[in-house]
Amino acid sequence: MSNDREGWISVRIYKIDNGSGSAGNASCEVSHNLLIAVSEHDEQPNQNLFEIGPFYNPEITKITAQERIKLFTVEYGDFDSRQTIQMKVSINELVFEK
């Protein structure tokens, strides 16, 4: 789980196990989905939840705050062939960066 409460919104990221064998390998390794919970700082905050995945061995490597959005980087995959994706999340949307 990762948590970032800086700026206009709070972001919590949860890693959810997809069950034994879900990684598609001969072993019992699992894949994970990420749940990204976003909330404004307010007395009656707007909130949203996004789910992305599946990922094999995901790790949040960086979270950066900008005005009203958060940028984060996820590394995933086998140890010798890791891939990286960057995402931008606001209270209303989750966008994959190129």
Image (cartoon, rainbow, N blue to C red):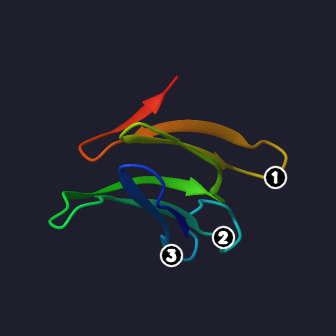
Location of the N terminus by quadrant is bottom right
Quarter of the image where one finds residue 36: bottom left
Q: Position of residue 70 (x, y in %)?
A: 46, 43
Nearer to us in this view, 13 or 30? 13
Residue for badge 2? 29
Nearer to us in this view, 28 or 96? 96
Look at the numbered discs 1 and 2 and tell me whether their residues touch, using CB distance below 8 Å. Answer: no
Name the kind of residue labelled 3 in the image. Gly
Choose the circle earlier in sequence order: 1 or 2: 2
Q: Position of residue 97 (x, y in %)?
A: 49, 28
Closer to the eye: label 1 or 2: 1
Residue for badge 3? 19
Name the kind of residue labelled 2 in the image. Glu
Name the kind of residue labelled 1 in the image. Phe
Tell me, for residue 79, which label it has, or none.
Answer: 1
User: Marks 3/2: CA distance?
Assistant: 8 Å
* Residue 86 appears left or right of 36: right
Nearer to us in this view, 65 or 23? 65
